[in-house]
Image: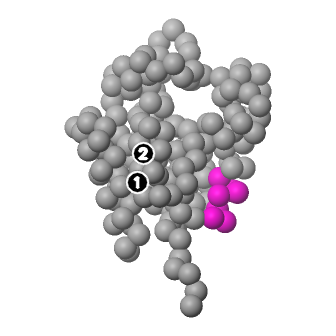
Amino acid sequence: MPAPPSPPHLILVGLPGAGKTTVGRRVAERLERPFLDFDREIARREGASVARIFAERGEGYFRAAERRLTEELRGSAGMVLAPGGGWAAIPGNVALLRPPGRIIYLRADPETVLRRLRRSRNQRPLLAGPDPLGTLHRLLADREEFYRQADCVVDTEVMDLQRLIDAVAELAWTFRGE
């Protein structure tokens, strides 16, 4: 008897600092699935931080690395993925994984994201300038139409972390049953 098919990839999209990595890691643990953070994987492969890749090789180089990673993942399933904040806006990326992959947009206001990022020690190259809040507003304006093409939107503004993890895990189970 053949093994049951793997569930589709669960892909979390949203602004930098929306919670893709934090939520994704915890949801993957709960669902007993592998988790992959694109930024960390690309940094590992390149032997340099994302900030250094942006500074030395440029955003275009980084986006090409994201694309290569996405192409590799096309042939697999069952992971919880946390691509970079701009991944969904790059033409063709979403189509490589969906269908069957399912996308959840973790919606967060730029002000909330900035508060979260100030508490973390992560370097975000696109937010390194003098007006990170203005940059977040511009990123959201540029990317939201792509984020909203997700299968579901989860508003991170109205839930604490545990409820957010519960909601995303429940959606993953719903997607598996389709």
Please, which residue is most extreme toward the left here? 158
Instruction: Report the span colored magenta.
Output: 70-76
State the residue position of label 2.
26
Q: Secondary structure at mark 2?
A: helix
Circle 1 crowding by C-alpha within 10 Å: few under 14, some 14–19, many from 20: few
Please, which residue is most extreme toward the bottom here? 1
Image coordinates for residue 68, horizontal then vertical, percent: 72, 50
Q: Residue at x 48, y 31 (%)?
A: 16
Image coordinates for residue 137, horizontal then vertical, percent: 41, 25
The quarter of the picture where the C terminus appears is bottom left
Q: How many marks?
A: 2
In the picture, measured across the screen, residue 140 lies left or right of residue 52, that is left
Q: Is residue 74 magenta?
A: yes
Q: Residue at x 26, y 36 (%)?
A: 160
Q: Residue at x 48, y 39 (%)?
A: 21
Q: Nearer the viewer, residue 103 or 6?
A: 6
Q: Is residue 84 magenta?
A: no
The image shows residue 39, relative to residue 121, as above or below, that is: below
Confirm whether residue 107 shows in the render. Answer: yes
Image coordinates for residue 47, horizontal then vertical, percent: 77, 31
How far apart are the two marked residues, 2 and 1, measured between alpha carbons? 6 Å
Q: Amino acid at mark 1?
A: Arg
Q: Are marks 2 and 1 in contact (CB under 8 Å)?
A: yes
The quarter of the picture where the N terminus appears is bottom right
Q: Secondary structure at mark 1?
A: helix
Image coordinates for residue 45, horizontal then vertical, percent: 75, 39
State the residue position of label 1.
30
